[in-house]
Image (cartoon, rainbow, N blue to C red):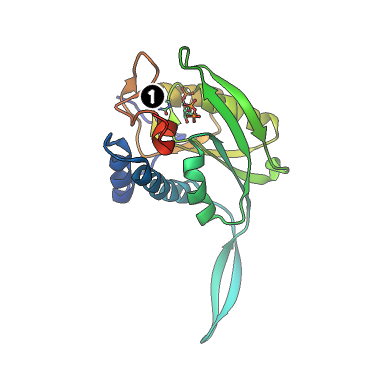
Amino acid sequence: MYILPVPVHIVDHPLVHDALVTLRDKRTPPEHFRRAATRISVMLAAEALRDIPTRAVTVETPLGPAPGERTGAEVVVVPVLRAGLGMLDAVLELVPDARVGHIGLQRDEATAVASQYYRKLPARLDASYVLMIDPMLATGGSAVAALDLLQREGARIVRMICIVAAPEGVALVERHHPEVAIYTPVVDRELNAHKYIVPGLGDFGDRLYGTI
Ligand code: PRP
Ligand code: URA
């Protein structure tokens, strides 16, 4: 049983759980898998950006002035390729003017150690809210490699959203990046011998793109 320390935010909402069970179900085809990934990502991202700064504005409705708030921070969203791309459209729907960085990481099939094959990050990371998106937090090797890179490039405020986490991955991120808040609906039981999350949902990228 995983005991929750401060940086993990469990996003507990009936619609999140509904999408999650669709993603877990091995009978779900890529078409429905993608849609469920988008649905759940909208809710996870909204939660992760709950405390984003806002500025007061007034707009004119057809009946007169109405006070309101506009988001007042630069947001940079960073999908970890390839599976993180399945969450990107959802975040851009919520924050249409976000800038997007990409980090390409792939786990070795035998060792599960991640190596980087691509990176392209926008400027001014130090002045931005950075939202790293990667659906699976398994050993945590990929997340820590991506967070190390973001930190080296100057990012200061970083949140990460994932769809399924394992206790080992959460612990590794906490050890290396205690300042990074993790938003996830669930911390699953364990990793298997091949470092897949159990019960998890299988290989997210393969299920998203039908490459099984
Ligand atoms: C998956 C997933 C994470 C990583 C998690 O990517 O999207 O990036 O594994 O595992 P870890 O916590 O043990 O590092 P994968 O390497 O399978 O590449 P893909 O996204 O291209 O399918
Ligand atoms: N990557 C996945 O896609 N699934 C896992 O369970 C672990 C890593």
Residue reaching furthest to the front: 211
Q: Check the image and report above or below for 81 versus 35.
A: above
Please report the residue visible at 64 percent of the width from the left and 30 percent of the height from the top: 118
Residue 42 placement (x, y as % from top left): 44, 50
Q: Quadrant of the N terminus?
A: top left
Q: Is residue 77 above or below residue 193?
A: below
- Looking at the picture, does residue 122 appear above or below residue 67? above
What is the quadrant of residue 71 in the picture? bottom right
Is 14 on the left-hand or right-hand side of 212?
Answer: left
Choose top left, top right, bottom left or bottom right for residue 186. top left
Q: Position of residue 70 (x, y in %)?
A: 58, 63
Q: Residue at x 52, y 45 (%)?
A: 88
Q: Quadrant of the C terminus?
A: top left
Figure label count: 1
Q: Foreground: 53 or 12?
A: 12
User: Is residue 49 shown to the viewer in this render?
Assistant: no
Q: Secondary structure at mark 1?
A: helix
Residue that numbered label 1 is attached to: 167
| Residue 15 locus on image (x, y percent) | 31, 50
Local packing at callout 1 (Cα closer than 10 Å; few below 14, some 14-19, many 20+) is many
In front of the other: 175 or 136: 136
Q: Position of residue 192 (x, y in %)?
A: 34, 17
Furthest residue toward bottom: 63
Of the pair 104 and 163, the residue shown nearer to us: 104
- Quarter occupied by residue 132: top right
Q: What residue do we see at 58% from left, 38% from top?
A: 158
Give the answer, above or below, for where 183 lies relative to 108: below
Q: Is mark 1 within 8 Å of ligand 1?
A: no
Residue 29, can we see it?
Answer: yes
For badge 1, the amino acid type reads Pro
